């Protein structure tokens, strides 16, 4: 309470008693804890690649996933069918499935399940053959109307079928009819009934089909008898946590529909960052007060369920109730016990998680939006939500159930009508055993002999290996199959010497992004004397940056960092006048566009504009849809006469002591520049062998019609293009005083070395270079040569990328590929301009020479790190992993989960997306805000955890894990896989159950290819690993 | 003479080109064959190109020959003399239908090309193009219709395909719910239209517009109806038009229709089907001419809708609703123009508005990019645009207006509470009586479906 009044001094506060204050303080902490579960996605213009389940990283992966899937109501793994398809086409190897299962069972693999074989075999049978299960009514239909009791399942092997038939026949004719006693008391009646149905007298003349039918019927009846009396599966501890869940179950009407309609509309106008022409005007900026002001007047046309709201709000205001009091009040009224409050609050907040998460982000990270909200807004949101929840629940209970009693007892009053979802009914269980019997060859008489306790054990065993568990095992096998292929390939590669040119012609530093893997591979191919490095794409220059053409600063560093430096781009002094004129033209044109846009939406000017010039809109429309490239060219040439001048400089040198966004505070001090430059060089191990030219290439993506554009940009730059960072680092390293300082710190940069910053456009595969006017005359030839090679690499990269685009022809020339990727960037109708980091699966931290010449299929993050230059405390590796492990695993899990359940974890298909409040997208007309990645960005992804391969020793990783909590959690709880490559020998070891065990390779050879094109050409699927012939040809260095 | 033959041939081509597309897409779907994306998009492009060329040729021939009214007769498709029932299929090329047909082909062709890339690898690709073919057919049939029953047939196809496209993503509940809502409003409007059509048949003995409106070519014409008849038919037609064009009080469905893929929202609700109501009013404009009262009513409805939608558009925070209401405000203005008798203006306005709004809706996903570019050009945050009422209106009024706009004029609530609820109550009451009666007769609970739990059974629960 005390805090609340601090936040809003104007609000009337009731006299707080000490106990009350403590209670509401506890409640606040509870809510804030639960809020961590909300999607950590801020405004969509700065896409944050964080683990969707970041809040659950303190749990082991599978448990966290299970918990998350329960809370978010999303699928934890792919469907069983999908895995089974992968098994059938060889993507999951049978050996891996077996290995995973054995590892999972550990010592229990050989324990016997009654007389039905080992647990391992039972589980393997359940994995290998699809176990069909249906709702009770459908299952009855399947039994009655399909051939389930007439023909064996197609998966049953012929040998087992024959044996089942033979055994059944033998038993019936030789034992049963000869009067041998039966184990089951009730079984005789069943068999008799069946015999009568099938025609007892002519049993010896039954056809094969008739025997099959008899056998299956008998089996089915035996299974039904057998499972009878097995104890039901334990019920979930708290099904239907919210009154809403009870009502939905009972009436089929969802109270949330009503509540969300109001909440979405109000949140959208309240949080709006300037999209509506007419913003919400209220007396207070607090959500709670705005809501009160807005809804506390009774109106004639209010939906019936909401009518008491106005009166309620007035009473709350009169009583001086604050949001926390309201929440406590509703919790009491809903009868939520203290122990269940966490879960109740979690599911309540997660019911509209997009909006709630956005509020929480705007509250905790006010630096990320132009118009943030005040602290405590999430609590206010929750209070409003619970008020509406209560009204909707009361109304539906009253009108649909005729129940006007207190909501706290709603569940108990209707307990009889609530059927628990958990556990299968008798027929469902019997059907599972029935299917297993057919593939495992359990004949009816054998099953008849089982005792009650054996049956119970069998049922328990089957229940224990539920669908989710089977999918978990499958998922692990799916990961293992890729992982072992990757480790095999890397192991083979280490048997060949590292490839690093002794006197590189030029060097290039890239972002560690998986998209740059292919680019670097091609560059190394077209220029064997080039050397490439990978670093986080902000190149250790965290800054707030404003370009010459920009209105605002944008944050160019990882989302977790709040940069303390400001850098602007200035137009060269000689161009000042020119720049001013251009800016004026832009401004004039901008305001004209704005007036036109607003005009077309209004009454009178809209009429004049649409009737007068509306027809002309058909020209750009038809042009941009049918001829996107031509349109884009025309546009860019039209834009040329208002573009800012090319001659610009970064203002990097700061004059005042304290940094700030205005004049004197802009830039960095010499010491800061040296620190940043040194770290960038040391992290990548670039401390010697400098070439004459060193390129530093950031990356970004320029594409149209795509609210998720920022997800294609550099994740290390908060979803912005990383060009300015590359340019800043190049300028820093070219700076003479900085070099002098660096030399005294032990990094000698030769005078002839020149750094050039650039921006790689990953969508159209083009490179823009910065500050070329400063290039010394002596280096122009070198630059021409390097630029030519870089352009060739761009074209080849485009060619390789095109194999993934299903709309591009399977066979095409490099020139066509360049045209295709450029057209995709300019096409208004293109929903997949590029694939971003999709398909990522691997992250290599180590010297490039070790993996150079290995085909990694654009699936690997590549971070440069030289273990020989690290100290004994592994400081360098420590700071690399401190950033790379959370960032790369965040990217990977974001893609993985968005693929596993696209509408759930991701944001579903892009097609109906609707940009809202300049903050995010909704599905269609109105929905929750949709964080996560769209299906069009993840459809070719293989959902797997990232496998880290780090060139280091176990001791180093252990030390780092003990120093950093986040690295420890992620690695120890297996949110990533980890393997180490010994810096000296190249031997691999894998991290399993907190131990490093030597890796046993399964193969010692890899396909060798003359050119990358011959390897990937014509293939649209994921590709395996291959070695470039260049690696093997340089056997003797 | 040859010119006439050419004209008829080209006219038939323009009118029937969509039939080919419909047969191709629908036929293969019926046979269970899945057409390739490329085949579908090519078929759509060809259909539109052929239709557009034919329509342009007809226009050229009409200009050369000076003929302003080219009927194409198919005669009575169905005729039951005893019951005085006949279905007369007839197309007319005149000053009204030709621009509409050209616009329809142009927009649908562009959208077809757009959608074939936008929906690439979407599981509903074929389904989308099926709805698209039905829509195109419906649009062409209704714009070229020469009799009221032909117009009704096209009108129904447009309604059906629109509702299905709203519910395109049928695995989520919201699109289905909103599709159903659109469908309900459409059915209401259709019922009014059907009644009007029957009334017209009853009065004039035929549904031919030429017969009803005199033989002058559009917009010249005199209604062959008495004032009383006009007041019987006119309001029904107005309800039909209001439902289709989302005029007050039906406006609530238009923003809800933005559930489908962006291109379908763009062309169907932003540009074509939303103008169909206005088209109907244009087609029967001689009736409006004959009655000042009816014209006044139309104007009033148009102006009220325009004002309401322009206001509502300003408070919307999502781009598609903003554009939906912006679109509606212009439709309102167009209807008002029709009421005032400015036929050509309304026609020009429709064509211009359709093109403009389609472009804006296609660019809707680029909104964030455009906004950033605008801010960079201006060098500052975009300030909220001040309208004249911001200056003139006193505060309490502004607040009230804002609320009205945010709640979308309470139109949906009003329809739900005062139209849908009473009807539902009546039917539920009847249902109760019937159950009580059958239970009484059977001595048992009769309806087995009552015992099935409402929530679907979950086979595998997430734990």
Image: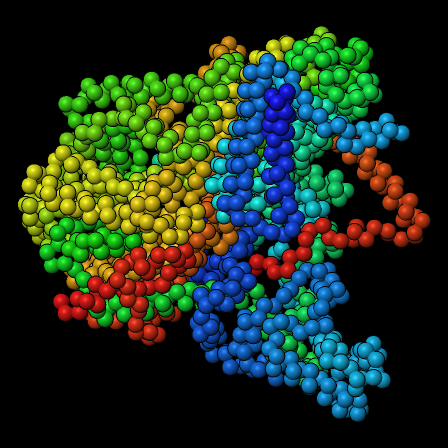
x, y percentage for residue A460?
62, 73
Q: Name above or below for residue A528 compared with residue A461.
A: above
Residue A349 coordinates in the image, percent (x, y): 53, 44
Q: Residue at x 44, y 53 (%)?
A: A940
Q: Quadrant of residue A372?
A: top left
Residue closest to the eye, A1031 or A134: A1031
Look at the picture and state if A46 lies above or below A640. Answer: below
In x, y percent, where is residue A29? 46, 46
Determine if residue A221 is in view: yes
The residue under the point 27% across, 36% down is A544
Q: Is residue B243 above or below residue A53?
A: above
Task: Decide if residue A653 is on the left or right side of residue A588.
Answer: left
Point 66% across, 27% down: residue: B142
Q: Residue at x 28, y 56 (%)?
A: A862
Where is the C terminus of chain A found, in terms of image quarters?
A: bottom left
- The reply to whether residue A955 is in sight is no
């Amino acid at each position: 309470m005390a805090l609340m009044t601090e936040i809003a001094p104007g609000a009337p506060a009731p006299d707080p008693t000490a106990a009350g204050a403590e209670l509401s303080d506890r409640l606040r902490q509870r809510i804030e804890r639960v809020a961590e579960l909300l999607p950590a996605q801020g405004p969509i213009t700065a896409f944050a690649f964080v683990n969707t389940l970041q809040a659950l990283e303190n749990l082991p992966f599978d448990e966290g996933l299970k918990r998350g899937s329960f809370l978010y109501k999303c699928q934890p793994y792919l469907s069983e069918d999908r895995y089974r398809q992968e098994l059938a086409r060889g993507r999951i190897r049978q050996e891996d499935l077996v290995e995973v299962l054995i590892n999972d069972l550990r010592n229990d693999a050989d324990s016997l399940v009654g007389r039905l074989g080992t647990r391992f075999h039972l589980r393997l049978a359940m994995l290998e053959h699809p176990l069909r299960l249906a709702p009770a009514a459908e299952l009855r239909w399947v039994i009655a109307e399909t051939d389930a009791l007439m023909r064996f399942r197609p998966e049953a092997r012929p040998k087992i079928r024959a044996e089942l038939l033979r055994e059944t026949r033998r038993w019936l004719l030789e034992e049963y009819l000869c009067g041998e006693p039966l184990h089951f008391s009730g079984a005789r009646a069943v068999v008799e009934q069946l015999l009568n149905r099938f025609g007892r007298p002519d049993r010896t003349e039954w056809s094969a089909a008739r025997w099959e039918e008899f056998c299956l019927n008998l089996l089915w009846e035996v299974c039904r008898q057998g499972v009878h009396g097995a104890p039901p599966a334990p019920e979930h501890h708290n099904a239907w946590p919210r009154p809403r869940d009870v009502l939905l179950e009972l009436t089929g009407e969802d109270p949330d529909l009503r509540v969300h309609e109001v909440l979405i509309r109000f949140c959208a106008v309240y949080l709006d960052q300037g999209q509506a022409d007419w913003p919400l005007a209220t007396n207070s900026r607090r959500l709670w007060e705005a809501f009160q002001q807005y809804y506390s007047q009774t109106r004639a046309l209010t939906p019936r369920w909401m009518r008491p709201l106005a009166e309620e709000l007035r009473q709350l205001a009169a009583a001086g109730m604050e949001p926390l009091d309201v929440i406590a009040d509703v919790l009491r009224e809903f009868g939520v016990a203290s122990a269940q409050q966490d879960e109740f609050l979690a599911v309540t907040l997660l019911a509209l998680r997009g909006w709630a998460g956005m509020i929480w982000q705007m509250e905790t990270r006010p630096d990320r939006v132009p118009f943030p909200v005040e602290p405590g807004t999430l609590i206010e949101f929750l209070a409003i939500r619970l008020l509406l929840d209560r009204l909707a629940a009361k109304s539906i209970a009253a009108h649909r159930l005729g129940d006007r009693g207190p909501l706290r007892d709603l569940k108990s009053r209707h307990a009889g009508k609530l059927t628990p979802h958990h556990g299968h009914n008798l027929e469902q269980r019997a059907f599972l055993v029935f299917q297993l019997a057919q593939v495992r060859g359990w004949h009816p008489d054998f099953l008849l002999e089982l005792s009650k306790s054996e049956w119970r054990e069998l049922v328990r065993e089957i229940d224990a290996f539920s669908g989710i568990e089977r999918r978990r095992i499958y998922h692990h096998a799916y990961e293992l199959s890729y992982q072992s292929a990757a480790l095999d390939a890397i192991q083979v590669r280490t048997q060949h010497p590292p490839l690093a040119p002794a006197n590189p012609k030029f060097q290039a530093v890239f972002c560690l992004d998986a998209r740059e893997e292919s680019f670097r591979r091609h560059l190394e191919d077209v220029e064997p004397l080039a050397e490439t490095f990978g670093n986080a794409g902000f190149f250790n220059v965290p800054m707030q940056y404003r370009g010459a053409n920009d209105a605002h600063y944008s944050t160019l560093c990882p989302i977790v960092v709040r940069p303390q430096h400001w850098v602007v781009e200035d137009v060269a002094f000689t161009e000042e006048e020119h720049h001013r004129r251009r800016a004026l033209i832009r401004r004039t044109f901008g305001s004209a566009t704005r007036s036109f846009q607003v005009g077309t939406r209004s009454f009178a000017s809209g009429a004049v504009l649409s009737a007068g010039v509306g027809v002309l809109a058909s020209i750009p429309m038809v042009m941009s849809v049918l001829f996107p490239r031509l349109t884009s060219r025309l546009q860019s040439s039209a834009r040329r006469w208002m573009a800012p001048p090319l001659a610009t400089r970064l203002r990097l040198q700061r004059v005042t002591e304290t940094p700030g966004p205005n004049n004197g505070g802009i830039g960095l001090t010499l010491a800061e520049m040296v620190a940043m430059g040194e770290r960038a060089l040391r992290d990548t191990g670039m401390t010697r062998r400098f070439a004459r030219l060193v390129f530093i290439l950031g990356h970004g993506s320029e594409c149209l019609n795509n609210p998720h554009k920022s997800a294609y940009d550099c994740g290390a730059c908060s979803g912005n293009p990383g060009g300015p960072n590359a340019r800043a680092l190049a300028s820093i390293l070219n700076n003479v005083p900085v070099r002098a300082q660096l030399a005294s710190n032990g990094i000698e940069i030769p005078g002839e070395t020149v750094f050039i910053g650039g921006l790689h456009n990953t969508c159209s595969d083009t490179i823009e270079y910065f500050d070329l006017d400063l290039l010394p005359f002596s280096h122009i030839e070198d630059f021409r040569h390097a630029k030519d090679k870089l352009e060739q690499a761009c074209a080849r990269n485009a060619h390789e990328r095109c194999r993934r685009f299903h709309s591009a022809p399977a066979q095409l020339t490099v020139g066509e590929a360049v045209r295709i990727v450029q057209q995709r960037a300019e096409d208004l109708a293109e929903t997949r301009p590029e694939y971003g980091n999709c398909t990522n699966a691997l992250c290599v931290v180590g010297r490039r020479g070790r993996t150079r010449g290995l085909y990694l299929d654009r699936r690997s993050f590549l971070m440069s790190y030289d273990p020989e230059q690290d100290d004994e405390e592994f400081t360098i590796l420590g700071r690399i992993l401190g950033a790379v492990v959370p960032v790369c695993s965040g990217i990977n899990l974001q893609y993985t989960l968005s693929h596993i359940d696209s509408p759930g974890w991701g944001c579903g298909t892009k097609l109906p997306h609707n940009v809202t409040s300049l903050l995010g997208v909704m599905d269609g007309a109105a929905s929750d805000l949709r964080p996560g990645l769209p299906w069009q960005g993840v459809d070719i992804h293989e959902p797997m955890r990232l496998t880290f391969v780090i060139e280091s020793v176990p001791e180093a990783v252990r030390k780092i894990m003990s120093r950093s909590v986040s690295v420890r959690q992620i690695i120890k709880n297996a949110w990533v896989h980890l393997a180490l490559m010994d810096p000296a020998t190249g031997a691999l070891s894998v991290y399993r159950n907190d131990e490093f065990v030597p890796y046993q390779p399964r193969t010692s050879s890899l396909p060798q290819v003359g050119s990358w094109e011959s390897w990937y050409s014509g293939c649209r699927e994921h590709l395996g690993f291959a070695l470039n012939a260049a690696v093997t040809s340089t056997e003797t260095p | 003479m040859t010119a006439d033959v050419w004209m008829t041939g080209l006219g038939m081509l323009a009118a029937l080109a969509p039939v080919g597309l419909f047969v191709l897409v629908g036929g293969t779907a019926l046979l269970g064959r899945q057409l390739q994306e490329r085949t579908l998009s090519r078929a759509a492009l060809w259909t539109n190109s052929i239709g557009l060329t034919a329509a342009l040729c007809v226009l050229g021939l009409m200009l050369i020959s000076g003929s302003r009214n080219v009927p194409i007769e198919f005669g009575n498709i169905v005729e039951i003399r005893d019951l005085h029932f006949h279905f007369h299929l007839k197309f007319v090329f005149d000053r009204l239908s030709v621009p509409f047909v050209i616009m329809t082909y142009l927009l649908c062709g562009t959208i077809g090309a757009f959608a074939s890339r936008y929906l690439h690898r979407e599981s509903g690709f074929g389904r989308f193009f099926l709805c698209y073919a039905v829509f195109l057919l419906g649009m062409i049939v209704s714009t070229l219709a020469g009799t009221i029953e032909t117009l009704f047939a096209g009108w129904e196809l447009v309604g059906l395909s629109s509702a299905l496209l709203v519910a395109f993503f049928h695995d989520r509940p919201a699109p289905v719910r909103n599709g159903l809502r659109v469908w309900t409003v459409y059915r209401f409007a259709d019922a009014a239209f059907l009644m009007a059509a029957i009334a017209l048949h009853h009065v004039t003995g035929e549904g031919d517009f030429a017969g009803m409106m005199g033989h002058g070519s559009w917009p010249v014409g005199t209604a062959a109806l008495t004032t009383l008849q006009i007041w019987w038919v006119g309001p029904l037609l107005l309800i039909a038009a209001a439902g289709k064009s989302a005029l007050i009080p039906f406006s609530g469905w238009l923003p809800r229709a933005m559930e489908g893929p962006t291109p379908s929202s763009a062309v169907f609700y932003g540009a074509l089907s939303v103008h169909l109501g206005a088209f109907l009013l244009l087609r029967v404009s001689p009736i409006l001419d004959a009655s000042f009262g009816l014209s006044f009513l139309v104007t009033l409805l148009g102006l009220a809708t325009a004002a309401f939608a322009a206001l509502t558009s300003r408070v919307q925070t999502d781009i598609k609703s903003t554009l939906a209401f912006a679109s509606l405000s212009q439709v309102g203005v167009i209807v008002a123009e029709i009421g005032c008798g400015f036929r050509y203006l309304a026609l020009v306005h429709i064509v211009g508005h359709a093109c403009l709004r389609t472009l804006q809706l296609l660019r809707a996903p680029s909104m964030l990019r455009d906004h950033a570019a605008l801010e960079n050009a201006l060098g500052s945050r975009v300030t909220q645009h001040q309208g004249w009422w911001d200056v003139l209106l006193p505060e309490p009024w502004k607040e009230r207006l804002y609320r009205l706009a945010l709640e979308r004029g309470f139109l949906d609530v009003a329809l739900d509470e005062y139209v849908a609820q009473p009807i539902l109550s009546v039917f539920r009451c009847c249902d109760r009586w019937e159950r009580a009666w059958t239970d009484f007769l059977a001595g048992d609970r009769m309806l087995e479906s009552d015992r099935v739990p409402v929530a679907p059974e979950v086979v595998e629960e997430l734990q």
